[in-house]
Amino acid sequence: MRRREFITLLGGAAACPLAARAQQAAMPTVGYLYVASPEAHAGRVAAFRKGLSETGYVEGRDVAIEYRWAHNEPARLPGLVADLVNRPVTIIAAGDLPSALAAKAASTTIPIVFETAADPVQAGLVASLNRPEANVTGVTNTGGELGAKRLGLLRELLPGAARFAVLVNPNNPLLAEAWIKDTQPAAAAIGIQLEILRASTHREIDAAFTSIPQKRVDALVVMPDNLFSTRRVQFATQAARHAVPAIYSNREYAEVGGLMSYGTNILDAYRQVGVYVGRILKGEKPANMPVLQPTKFEFVINLQTARTLGLTVPSTLLALADEVIE
């Protein structure tokens, strides 16, 4: 081989890794921030990736994703989001209200797409649903007086009940207080006494169930919360152990043995977050992207759990269900 050809070949070989590194560096990076832990949320992450893929972005091929999990310790969120901002990431996907608030506090320039069960205007995330302004938009799964609807479904199942409990997480005060305010007048309107229970750890969840017989509560409404969603099996187990009829915020609970659920399709909400992230990567501005609101709500009944609790589900209630788990 001639010397000139050898040098050309050597130079080309050396350039290949540099080109590969340059291509990798050009790949946009999404920061995925969540207050809870990954173990119980694999389905939501998969739904988020599905939404991304619908806009042409596949993880590892067209986009990199940096995952940050607070493992149910909200105090860790500012440090986690600071790490994402300093990298820096191209965009932040915030999977819950505490993560979204932490992301918004950390950056006024990096686009942020959230998913939350709270009213994003009342929570201070956006100026309005139709025109979010600034660098934040997303998906909300609240609406339609959901707390009142869950109370009504429980009352139809238990027409003789007089006292219900509502369980909220005091470590998520904006969301907890909003659900309490939504539920209390609805309970008064149908003649139900309402007991407010609070739990912010798995031990406090157990303690809340233990207190239900002492408080002579007939049924339980478990409000949306990221800690609660990671403890779905614990809720189903404790409800069965203490023979407590309960209704939850989404089908994920009913699928693991919860009695009933009523709410939005949570996996579709995370898919929509992925779609919004993809659209922003293509050049759209969060300020011009309305916050997506739920248009369909799911009512799921676990009939096997009802039998275990010794309950007969009225045919009228079965007819309302979008799905009955046998």
Image (cartoon, rainbow, N blue to C red):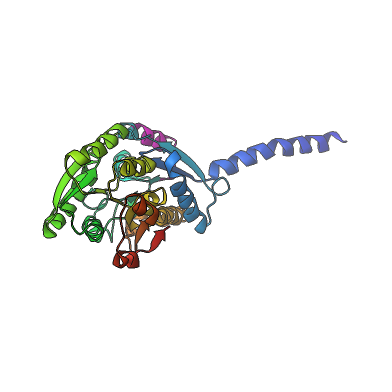
Does residue 33 belong to the magenta stretch?
Answer: no
Residue 129 screen position, x and y as percent: 27, 58
Whether residue 55 is visible:
no
Q: Which of 71 and 23 is in front in this view?
A: 71
Residue 44 screen position, x and y as percent: 43, 48
Answer with left or right where residue 262 lies relative to residue 164.
Answer: right
Specify the segment rendered in magenta.
Answer: 79-92
Residue 75 screen position, x and y as percent: 30, 32
**Quadrant location of the N terminus?**
top right
What residue is rendered at 76% in x and 35% in y? 10
Answer with left or right where residue 196 lies relative to residue 20.
Answer: left
Residue 16 screen position, x and y as percent: 68, 40
Does residue 80 belong to the magenta stretch?
Answer: yes
What residue is rendered at 31% in x and 58% in y? 312
Q: Which of 206 and 69 is in front in this view?
A: 206
Picture quadrant of residue 80: top left
Q: Which of 251 and 305 is in front in this view?
A: 305
Answer with left or right where residue 252 lies relative to residue 26.
Answer: left
Total marks drawn? 0
Whether residue 181 is visible:
yes
**Quadrant location of the C terminus?**
bottom left
Q: Please, is residue 14 above or below residue 167 in the view?
A: above
Q: Please, is residue 71 above or below residue 246 in the view?
A: above
